[in-house]
Amino acid sequence: MKFNSLCLSTLGLVAVASAQRQVLVTYPNDTPPSVVEDAKSAILATEPKGGKITEEFGLIKSFAATVSSDVIDTLNALSTSHKPIVEDDQTVTIQRQTPLEH
């Protein structure tokens, strides 16, 4: 019986971990720093569930994070006048995958 409980607990952790997304959160340039800090705090509050800030960018009001979908809803609700753009963090390349035809 202990083995089955352990398996179910492990499966539950895997399900929680798989609900996390790697995202980029970007705010408009006129966003007050307090709004961005509130967003970061909301993510860090979910750290026991896997939420974390993975990268912060200095030139733009943006950061990368690992979050769950409910945290994205929270970020959108934090400010009515300064809405973030939340997009999946992806690899971007400048090289063409297929050769150009002449």
Image: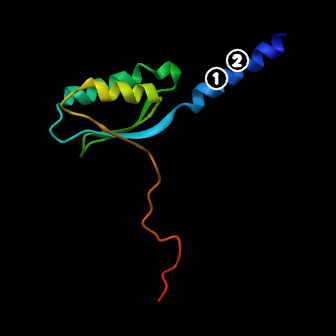
The residue sitting at 64% across, 23% down in the picture is 13
Q: Is residue 78 above or below residue 84?
A: above
Q: Amino acid at mark 1?
A: Leu
**Residue furthest bottom as drawn:** 102
Query: Around disc 1, counting alpha carbons within 10 Å, would you say few (fewer than 14), some (14 to 19), or many (20 or more)?
Result: few
Q: Quadrant of residue 19?
A: top right
Q: Is 101 placed left or right of 6 in the picture?
A: left
Residue 24 appears at what percent x and percent y?
Answer: 38, 41
Q: Nearer the viewer, residue 17 or 101?
A: 101
Q: Nearer the viewer, residue 73 or 23?
A: 73
Of the 4 image quadrants, the one containing the N terminus is top right
Q: How is the image coloured?
A: rainbow
Label 2 vs label 1: CA separation? 6 Å
Find numbered disc 2 in the image and state the secondary structure of the residue it sits on.
Answer: helix
Q: Is 37 placed left or right of 14 in the picture?
A: left
Residue 35 appears at what percent x and percent y?
Answer: 23, 27
Q: Is residue 50 above or below residue 86?
A: above
The residue carrying mark 1 is 13
The residue carrying mark 2 is 9
Q: Nearer the viewer, residue 52 or 85?
A: 85
Q: Quadrant of residue 85?
A: top left
The residue sitting at 76% across, 16% down in the picture is 6
The residue sitting at 49% across, 85% down in the picture is 101
Residue 37 appears at what percent x and percent y?
Answer: 27, 26
Q: Is residue 10 above or below residue 1?
A: below
Q: Amino acid at mark 2?
A: Ser
Residue 41: numbered disc: none
Whether the residues at callouts 2 and 1 have beta carbons within 8 Å, the answer is: yes
The residue sitting at 82% across, 10% down in the picture is 2
